[in-house]
Amino acid sequence: MRTDTPQPVRLSDYRPFPFLIETTSLEFQLDPSATRVKATLSIKRSGDAAEPLVLNGERLKLISAAIDGQGLSANQYALDAEHLTIHQVPDAFELTTEVEIDPSANKALMGLYMSGGRFCTQCEAEGFRTITFFPDRPDVLSRFTVRIEADAAFPYLLSNGNLWEGGEVDSSQPDRRHYAVWNDPFPKPAYLFALVAGELDVLEDSFVTMSGRTVALKVFVDPGQAPRAAYALDALKRAMKWDEEAFGREYDLDLFMIVAVRDFNFGAMENKGLNIFNSSLLLAAPETATDMDYERIESVVAHEYFHNWTGNRITCRDWFQLCLKEGLTVFRDQSFSADMRGEAVQRIKDVKALRARQFAEDAGPLAHPVRPNSYLKIDNFYTATIYEKGSELIRMLKTILGAETFRKSLDLYFERHDGEATTVEAFIACFADASGRDMSDFFAWYEQAGTPAVSLAHAYDETAKTLEITLTQSTAPTNGQPIKRALPVPVTIGLLDGEGEVLRDSEVVLLDAPASTVRWEGVERAPVISALRGFSAPVNLTTDTRSVDRYVQFAADPDLFNRWEAGQTVARELVLGRAAGTPDEVGEERYADALGKALVDDASDPAFKALLLALPTEGDLSLAVDPVDPAAIHAARVHLKAVIAVHLGDLLRRLHGDLQSGGEFSADARAAGKRALRNACCDLLAADPHAVNVERVVGHFESAANMTDAIGGLSALVAIGGASAEKALAAFHAQWRHEPLVLDKWFAAQARDPGEGAIGRILALTAHPDFDAGNPNRLRALVQGFSSGNPARFHDETGAGYRFLADQILAVDGFNPMTAARLVEPLGAWRRYVPELGALMRQQLERIREHVGLSKNVLELVSRALD
Ligand code: ARG
Ligand code: ZN
């Protein structure tokens, strides 16, 4: 049983730091197990004269500390596990500290650590305090100069900003130590500090900015991997150009660097001038990366680059404001991807991800506002709510105010707050000032957790030709927020007639009360209402739309998002109906028929058709019922897939054949869309596994000329199971065992195996020589691939799946609490499951909570989950 109760950090406790750190000079003597860091800070008091200087510092061995060159005696300071406190300091002074740290022992991958024999850093949110003593908070901005010294085994020495000088330290010495000095002219908070040292290959290019400055671009990767960085570099140039055009944002240093590392807790990090990436989000070649990888690389490269303005030039006052940079930057990267790859397809993918991750989070005990007001570990708040819902809020601002005012507001934000660490309030004030509108209601979106339920009912008067649409909203209570307010919900609505002809173009209706009715005159024919077009607000919409009208939308809605959504809604009803014991066989055939028609529509894009063909995921379906019976949902979904596969067999096989492309690989959206459709056909054919189809799927796998097709085939074979799956897995492993990123996919494919006995095989994989829980990519491939990607087996009735997850969480928590905490979520949903399963999930959460030595990260999440 734990006795210590960690105290939460609260937004309401915010106080400015009472000192300014005008300059920070760091000197690193790099050594894998004993690195020395000397820090010289020039400090000025800005607050009360009585305030002591309190610096953050964890796991640091203090060697010395001095003020203006005078060593501190033991009674002048206090040192605890988290702080260095100097009781009395002058109003202006220079503080020098020297510490020793052990990067090779750092398996938490926060601060300075080793990956693949190279030094690298991750400081956001609170990693800098494990490098040196410093006010490690985002509102303390300082000008950094960094001197790095290492021996010849580490040829590249990189940090933020511009390279000032470098060379050999003393060429007469045998160890040939060398050094580099970097200076970053832009004041920044410590979380944006970065250092990389080691042997790397570099791919170089340049970009001429809108004002004519030439920026050198360098992407550093493991030796031998440079060709695989070409796509990321190309995406970077497109992102730089796009940000100039779409937002008027120009890059500000003469150099922009990206480094890829294999061991990284999350996707990537926007350190000033020196972004550090998980190699899975940077390296790509047709043989090793799927189209989804290419897509994500493009968007994450853009995301981190866009942070240079939304995050770095303007940062957050405190971590409660995280969405200020993350929500806005996700919105910017989504807009970029939409311009690169097509608006509707991008929107559908973004909404699928939003529902899968954020709606699930918002529906469970881990629900929190986009701007939370307390936390134990800020690392736990890098969530889908902060990122994805945060982005939806920005999108709504654009929808409500219009593109022009939206841009004007952001221009004002950049002008007003450049160089500052600011707040969401200050951000929203820019929208109010630029638009002349009162935005105070909108702020509730930042403060209120939970997904609003919106319902739409309509009444059409045939003689008067009037249409009344009544919208209502409500938000269910969430942990700590029993009472909810009505939010301003922009609902974009258009009308079709029963033949699918346009009756009315889109219009934005702002629902800003619990209920409101709008009346449209001159509606000539009985309308089909297409509401929430483009998913204009992050809500759950239910409508009084009749089933026939959904088919009208599915065939003809000019809003492609809603065309797709109509199909998903029908599919959801069919699967859930069957899962609840009320199958609708006629409906299933009819749906398959409509899909068949959509597939042969020459006007629509293959990428879009691929999305139409994919049924709602089991996760998505489980959000629509209470309580969830995962086995029933799985069986019903498999059944609908099989119906479609049988009904459309000839068409699917024909398309699958026709779409096969010979010739050169292109990663562009058009080519990727065709591959997506062909793989969607393959996936469906696997649901009707008679000999002809199995042979086709095997052929798909064996003749794959790129990783997209190889993984498509492999996943389909794993879903079929049996000897052909075994054979394919063995062949895949033999071919790729020396490519870590590809091997991750091999683990992930097996983690998603829905077959009987899969848990045993997955357990066995944790003992596979290639499994390494210390590497977050490998760990997530297997463990998260299973817990999030394989609901049928995760929710095994014996509870074996839950036990497996809890075991993994506890094992990883021993050395990497941040990554361990990110695995907790699937168990958190226990209340939504049928009681037998819910109780088993709860048991594992309790077991985790009781574990001696549990980290604050995991403790916070399991406690909230059990609340
Ligand atoms: N700022 C980074 C990004 O979104 C992510 C940093 C994640 N940090 C963390 N402690 N989880 O681009
Ligand atoms: Zn970000």
Image (cartoon, grey):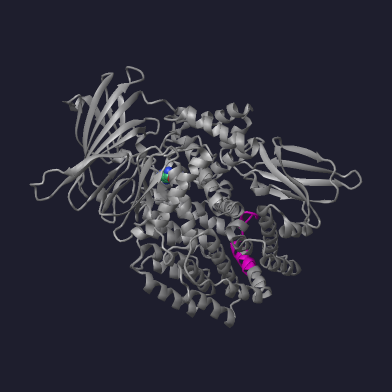
**Image position of 474 with respect to 153: above or below:** above
Q: Which residues are magenta?
A: 622-638
| Residue 233 image position (x, y, % from top left) | 40, 52
Instruction: Decide which of 368, 244 is in the foreground and name it.
Output: 244
**Image position of 595 with respect to 848: above or below:** below
Work out which residue is located at the far bottom of the displayed protein and give it.
Answer: 691
Q: Can residue 746 be seen in the rendering of this structure?
A: yes
**Image position of 59 with respect to 496: above or below:** above
> Does the magenta segment cover residue 629?
yes
Instruction: Decide which of 855, 554 is in the foreground and name it.
Output: 554
| Residue 325 image position (x, y, % from top left) | 47, 38
Q: Can residue 382 be seen in the rendering of this structure?
A: no
Q: Is residue 535 left or right of residue 734?
A: right
Work out which residue is located at the far front of the displayed protein and give it.
Answer: 212
Q: At 45% from the left edge and 37% from the top edge, which residue is drawn?
A: 309
Q: Is residue 472 left or right of residue 271?
A: right
Q: At 55% from the left edge and 78% from the top edge, which residue is drawn?
A: 696
| Residue 356 image position (x, y, % from top left) | 56, 53
| Residue 449 image position (x, y, % from top left) | 58, 40
**Image position of 833 with respect to 274: above or below:** below
Q: Is residue 789 left or right of residue 208?
A: right
Image quadrant assignment for residue 377: top left
Q: Is residue 551 left or right of residue 676?
A: right
Work out which residue is located at the far top of the displayed protein and give it.
Answer: 49
Instruction: Decide which of 564, 4 is in the foreground and name it.
Output: 564
Counting the numbered discs, the total is 0
> Does the magenta segment cover residue 628?
yes
Q: At 52% from the left edge and 32% from the top edge, which residue is drawn?
A: 411
